Image (cartoon, helix red, strand yellow):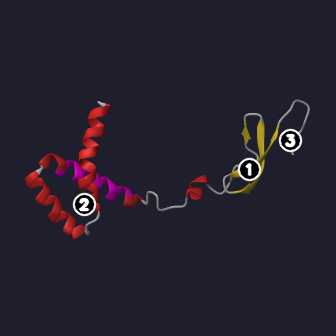
């Protein structure tokens, strides 16, 4: 099954790339021409294009990743034996190990 998917994708990708390089109006005519030559591939390309359009409408990948974290942040959160004391930059944080008999700051 995995091999079939890989082979199918290898067949579709060049056509999908070509379609994405076109303006939307030209793309419709291009898909119509592809449908006359290779209807199965055209159907798969059309499905991919519709999914890309749907994701664009939802704003997929249009937001900064940090906006998904919310405003609360992770300060004070425990991760195993560590408590996040403070963020010191993007992607880097300071933590302190919680040991028996010790208070975390």
Using the image as rendered, state which of residue 37 and residue 101 is in the foreground. 37
Q: Is residue 99 above or below residue 17?
A: above
Q: Is mark 2 on a helix, strand or loop?
A: helix
Q: Which residue is drawn at 83% across and 35% down?
A: 98
The stretch drawn in magenta includes residue 4: no
- How crowded pointer 3 is (Cα within 10 Å; few <14, some 14-19, many 20+) is rated as some
Q: Residue at x 91, y 31 (%)?
A: 101
The image position of residue 93, as x and y in percent, is 73, 50
- Which is closer to the viewer, label 1 or label 3? 1
Q: What element carries label 1?
A: strand
The image position of residue 71, as x and y in percent, is 65, 57
Name the side, left or right, on which 13 lies relative to 71.
Answer: left
Marker disc for residue 104: 3
* Mark-to-mark CA distance, 3 and 2: 57 Å
**Who comes first in sequence, dot 1 or dot 2?**
2
The image position of residue 4, as x and y in percent, is 26, 34
Q: What element carries label 3?
A: loop
**Who comes first in sequence, dot 1 or dot 3?**
1
Q: Is residue 72 above or below residue 25?
A: above
- Which is closer to the viewer, label 3 or label 2? 2
Q: From which residue to which does the magenta span run?
A: 42-55
Residue designated by label 1: 93
Q: Residue at x 29, y 37 (%)?
A: 5
Q: Give the quarter of the image for residue 9.
A: top left
Name the side, left or right, on which 34 lies relative to 24.
Answer: left
Using the image as rendered, state which of residue 71 and residue 90 is in the foreground. 90
* Mark-to-mark CA distance, 1 and 2: 43 Å
Badge 1 vs badge 3, beta-carbon distance below 8 Å:
no
- Classify the position of the N terminus by image quarter: top left
Name the side, left or right, on which 3 lies relative to 69.
Answer: left
The stretch drawn in magenta includes residue 44: yes
Marker disc for residue 19: 2
């Amino acid at each position: 099954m995995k091999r079939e998917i890989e082979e199918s994708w290898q067949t579709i990708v060049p056509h999908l790339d070509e379609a994405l390089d076109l303006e939307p109006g030209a793309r419709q005519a291009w898909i119509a021409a592809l449908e006359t030559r290779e209807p199965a591939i055209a159907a798969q390309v059309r499905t991919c294009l519709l999914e890309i359009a749907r994701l664009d409408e939802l704003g997929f990948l249009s937001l900064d990743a940090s906006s998904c974290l919310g405003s609360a942040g992770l300060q004070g959160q425990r991760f195993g034996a560590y408590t996040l004391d403070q963020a010191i930059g993007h992607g880097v944080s300071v933590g302190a190990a919680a040991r028996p008999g010790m208070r975390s700051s």
